[in-house]
Amino acid sequence: MEGKTIHIFDVIGGRAAVSTEDGDRLFETLNAFLGKEFEVILDFAKIETLTSTFLNAAIGQLYSQFDSPFLRQHLKVHNLQPEDRELMIKIIERAKEYFKDKENLEKDIREALEDE
Amino acid sequence: MLRIQLPLRIGSNLQGFSSLANIFQQVKSCDFETIHLDFQNTTWFDANMLAMLGAIMESAWTNDIHIINLRPEQEKIFKKTRYSYFGGESLPDRYATTVEYRKSKVSEVASFNGYLEKKLLSHNKLPNMSALLRKKIKESILEIFDNARAHGKCKFVYSCGQYYPRKGRLDFTVVDIGRTIRKNVRDYSQKKVSGKRALEWAVQKNTTTRKDNIPGGLGLCLIREFLSLNKGKIQIASADGYWYEKSGASRSEDLNVFFGGTAVNLEFNVNDTSSYCLSSETEETDIPF
């Protein structure tokens, strides 16, 4: 299996990984290499600020293309700050749930509301 | 000419948001008029609420808006924030109790991040907060900033802050004049919900109005979790709804006047000594994808 290290700092051009746009850019990069079945190392070195909006777009969105076993085998994370690990795990759990049954989940969410 | 009398106090609370929404309603229908915002009776105006006043004044840009009868002590505070009405004129903030007013393009998140670093977190009167607390504060505000872009579909975000040294509180307000939360929830659900109900729904975990392949519904929940640990407070005013949460207790109300945007006020306890680093036994590369 070919390998590729992706430095987030280089992809987004800064230390703050905070916008959906930047997350989307990282998703496109990851998607390109994972689509070719590369073993990808995602390197968070120099990233000082990280938000759920960025991770939803970059990582959460991966579950629209790949399943858990594939990502476990092909994607590794390096240099993620200890305090950001919990956030990363929450994003992954949320994405798995979101894509598991997207249509029904959306229907349930909508049905929780009533006309007023 | 239209003259709008401001109330005695504009605080960071339901009454403050309602009073400013009332100004929004009055100026919204004006075109090429002279408008006087009369501060004669106003003895207190939380500096962070300038974010909402600034957004409202900008939304009525075709008019000639003047602030009149502003008390000298308030004018000083407004100028300390470099409030745009005074053309960027500024006064030194000797006691460092204000965080500069700013209008930011939503596309310039890096620049907004720099503003938070320089004007908010490097505030020389803030107590010596842990690096993690600073990081959490910054990330919470950046979540709100990106929400304004993604859901508000607006071009600009307005922000301003006030620090209360004796209370150990930092209030920071972020405002956009864009799609309201009610509008987004109504479009998504096809249900005619009130602003209050839309807010109650939107702040829950895992609810999102996104329809693309990007999962959402975590950002506000994470901010709520953080502010609950931090013993801070969050308030949101949007359309005809108002919602707030403090120390884990939340409440929602009808805003008696429609506001055509979203205002979020985050209040941080800057004396917080919690660690915020949750221990994890997993290995570095062992992320459970």
Image (cartoon, coloured by chain):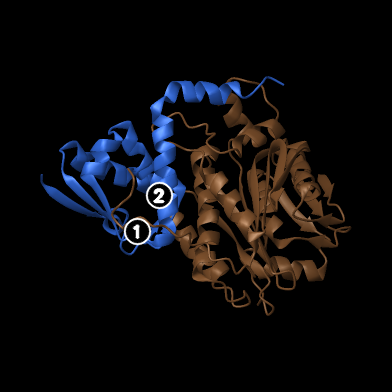
Chain colours: A blue, B brown
Tags 1 and 2 touching, CB below 8 Å: yes
User: Which class describes the residues within 10 Å of circle 2: few (<14), some (14-19), or many (20+)?
Assistant: many
Between the C-alphas of marks 1 and 2, the distance is 9 Å
Q: Please report the residue visible at 84 percent of the width from the left and 61 percent of the height from the top.
A: B69
Q: Where B137 sits versus A102, above or below?
A: below
Instruction: Please state which of residues B110 and A77 is positioned toward the viewer in this rendering.
Output: A77
Q: Is residue B180 visible?
A: no
* Side (left or right) of B142 relative to B60: left
Badge 2: chain ID: A
Instruction: Please state which of residues B82 and B164 is positioned toward the viewer in this rendering.
Output: B164
Q: Is residue A29 visible?
A: yes
Q: Which residue is mark 1?
A: A80
Q: Could you tell me residue B219's position as x and y percent?
A: 52, 45
Q: Which residue is mark 2?
A: A88
Indicate which disc residue A91 carries: none
Q: Could you tell me residue B248's position as x and y percent?
A: 68, 49
Instruction: Please state which of residues A74 and B56 is positioned toward the viewer in this rendering.
Output: A74
Q: Amino acid at mark 1?
A: Leu
Q: Please report the residue visible at 61 percent of the width from the left and 30 percent of the height from the top.
A: B183
**SS of the residue under disc 1:** loop
* Side (left or right) of A29 relative to B5: left
* Side (left or right) of B162 relative to A73: right
Q: Please report the residue visible at 73 percent of the width from the left and 42 percent of the height from the top.
A: B24
Q: Where B70 sits versus B199, above or below?
A: below
Badge 1: chain ID: A
Quarter of the rendering containing residue A81: bottom left
* Side (left or right) of B150 relative to A95: right
**SS of the residue under disc 2:** helix
